[in-house]
Amino acid sequence: MNQGNASPQNAAFFALDRDLARASPSISVVTTFFNEEGNVRAVIDEINSALSNLDYEIIAVDDGSADGTAGALTAAKQVHPRLRVIRHGRNAGKSRAVRTGVLAARGVIIATMDGDGQNDPADILALLEQFESVRAQGVVMIAGERITREDTAHKKLASQLANSVRRRILKDDAADTGCGLKLFRRGAYLRLPYFDNMHRYLPALMRREGFGVAFAPVKDRPRAHGRSKYTNWGRFLVGIVDLAGVFWLMARARRPESVDEERE
């Protein structure tokens, strides 16, 4: 596991989840779906199986699907009472779907994963274990990095190039920001500036706020149903604009050396 440096001010920030001190699940799993009818039931079944020994909830966000995803989620909800289903009236993109799920979540700890079946829910347990071992050091997020990529050679090459350029410019140490499997504190995420496609820059944005970030290997699996919603060219064009914007945000960030509350 590769661990990033945490800011000394983070001790004060651990009060950021005090509003969630009430009874709540120990973890909320936010899963986003867009035209993934064929994958819904298997993904929900696997999450429930993997987390059966934990106090958890699943929040499935249907991002304006045009196929049978909505019906498949309704059917899954009849079988899995811990499943909560939220629907967007129209497609708003992965970052907005993740944010919708995090805002609705009741848990202090959030795990995000894609609804295409390529993330293995069993890896959430490994991320949780690693998170517990480093949280006292100011780490608020464990970002999954895929060991192997179940994609075409063109997609792998494009991803490697994009990650290399982003890592060199933002110095976020992340080797695979496209991996949907991440674990983080809800309060820390909600401190980040929101913009479309922000999910690809979470390590850099977390560090911008002074939070510690660590990385851990996770599995990647081939799709069983459906197809990817992204193209290399589309990602490239959007990525240029996003990278410039995040670089500007990083350059404009200033943090206090410490944050202390005066007490009586």
Image (tube, rainbow, N blue to C red):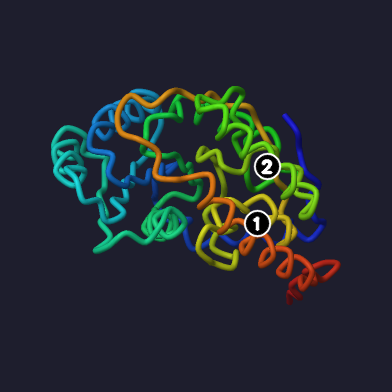
Say whether residue 205 is left or right of residue 125: right
Say if residue 67 shows up in the picture. Answer: yes
Q: Residue 144: where, in percent of width, then height?
A: 59, 35
| Residue 83 vs residue 225, the one in the foreground | 225
Is 39 situated above or below 84? above
Label 1: how many residues lie within 10 Å, few (<14), some (14-19) or many (20+)? some
For the C terminus, the quadrant is bottom right
Q: CA distance from mark 2 to mark 1?
A: 10 Å
In the rendered image, residue 171, in percent from the top left (x then y), is placed at 80, 50
Task: Report the number of discs.
Answer: 2
Q: Residue at x 49, y 63 (%)?
A: 19
What residue type is disc 2 on?
Arg
The answer to which of 65 and 46 lies nearer the viewer is 65
Identify the mark at residue 135; answer none if there is no mark.
2
Figure check: 248 above or below 8: below
* Residue at far right of view: 257
Disc 2 or 1, which lies upstream in sequence? Answer: 1
The quadrant holding residue 204 is bottom right
Does the rendering let one see residue 214? Answer: no
Q: Secondary structure at mark 1?
A: loop
Residue placed under numbered mark 1 in the picture: 14
Residue drawn at (19%, 45%) of the image: 67
